[in-house]
Image (spheres, helix red, strand yellow):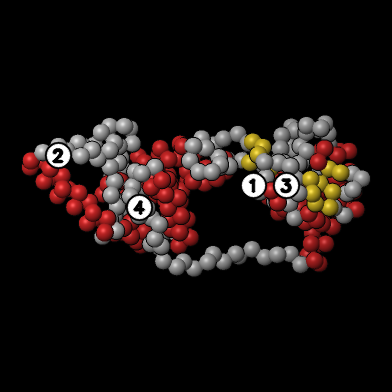
Amino acid sequence: MDTGTDHIGIKNREVSTHGLAFERALKWAGKMEALRDDDEVISTDRRTVRQYLEQWMQDKEQGLVGDEKPRSRTVSDYERLLKAWIFEPPKELYPLHGCRMKKLKVTKIKNFYKSMREDCQAKPYLVRRLHGLLRQAFETAVSEELLTRNPFKKDLVGKMPKRVCKGKMMTLEQAVAFLAAARKLTASGDDPYSALWHVFLDSGLRPEEAFGLKWPEVDWEAGAVSVKQVLVRVIGKPWRLEEPKTEGSARTMPLNAVTMQELRKWKLASEFTADDDFVFTTSKGTPLNGARRSFAR
């Protein structure tokens, strides 16, 4: 009886069908069926959870797993999450990372989540985020027939309270006052980014969309800007341009006359106005990396 091969092509075991060996094979097959009926995970993979996830992350980054290659920021988020809790976990955390795939059980996963919450004081949304990522990763293991079922598919973390957004939206009066202050600071030479704040509040563009704008995407006649790419920054890596995440994100946004006037002033004062230049740049012509100091002013 041939029981297949593991993830690197090594044959696991081959049992003869003669005499006592055949009886042992039947006993082993019955044991496997009992485990399956008890909803246990059956695996021939010799790797640990950590080893499997390290390989899965490499495949994910190269676009070998899933329907499409993920965005670099998504990969970076995955890497930070796994590094914090699987690859380099806290010493007090329940050691799920060292568990072998074939010994992975729901009880161990529950103990791991419990340890995250109680021993490491992990926020509920972090537990749910990690659970979703592990469920996705081990669904790949099932599709590749490394596991008989996904032990993370069940809702093992329970209902989590929704994150409450503590940010406050500006009222119309506050927005008008804010933009008036921005224009005043730019006119006095204290802060140059009045045009940026007008684009943000007028169009509702995300920072990565505004920072990814280039001059050909500004329609001076129609009074609008078109989002064709986004500027992505990942910690430890150089910035890069990527396509918008969804088809709906690639869009044209109208701008009012005041915003267009601020953009004209910005362009006249800029040294970087070629077609390949970004609209909003530093004094060196590189794309902006946030504008928190300007906002504070």
What separation in Å lies between label 4 and label 1 (alpha carbons)? 31 Å
Q: Are marks 1 and 2 in contact (CB under 8 Å)?
A: no
SS at mark 2 in the image: loop
**Closer to us: 98 or 152:** 152
The image quadrant of residue 244 is top right
Q: Which mark is residue 245?
A: 1
Question: Residue at 60% of width from left, 64% of height from top?
Answer: 165
Q: Residues within 10 Å of mark 4 (few under 14, many from 20)?
A: some
Amino acid at circle 4: Arg
Residue 175 vertical position relative to residue 26 in the rendered view, above or below: below
**Of marks 4 and 3, the one in the foreground:** 4
The mark that comes first in sequence, 3 or 1, is 1
Residue 201: quadrant of the picture: bottom right
Q: Secondary structure at mark 4?
A: loop
Earlier sequence position, callout 4 versus callout 1: 4
Say which amino acid is labelled 1: Lys
Whichever of labels 2 and 4 marks the residue nearer the N terminus, that label is 2
Residue at mark 3 to residue at mark 1: CA–CA distance: 8 Å
Q: Are marks 4 and 3 in contact (CB under 8 Å)?
A: no
Between circles 2 and 4, the one closer to the viewer is: 2
Q: Is residue 98 visible?
A: no
Depth check, mark 4 against mark 1: the one in front is 4
Earlier residue among tags 1 and 2: 2
The percent position of residue 250, horizontal first and vertical second, equals 72, 47
Q: CA distance from mark 1 to mark 2?
A: 55 Å
**Label 3 environment density (alpha carbons within 10 Å; few <14, some 14–19, many ≥20):** some
Q: Give the residue number, with chain letter if any, for mark 2.
A: 17
Residue 244 can be seen, yes or no: yes
What residue is pinned by disc 4? 149
Residue depicted at 22% across the width and 56% down the height: 34
**Is disc 3 placed on a helix, strand or loop?**
loop
The residue to which callout 3 is attached is 250
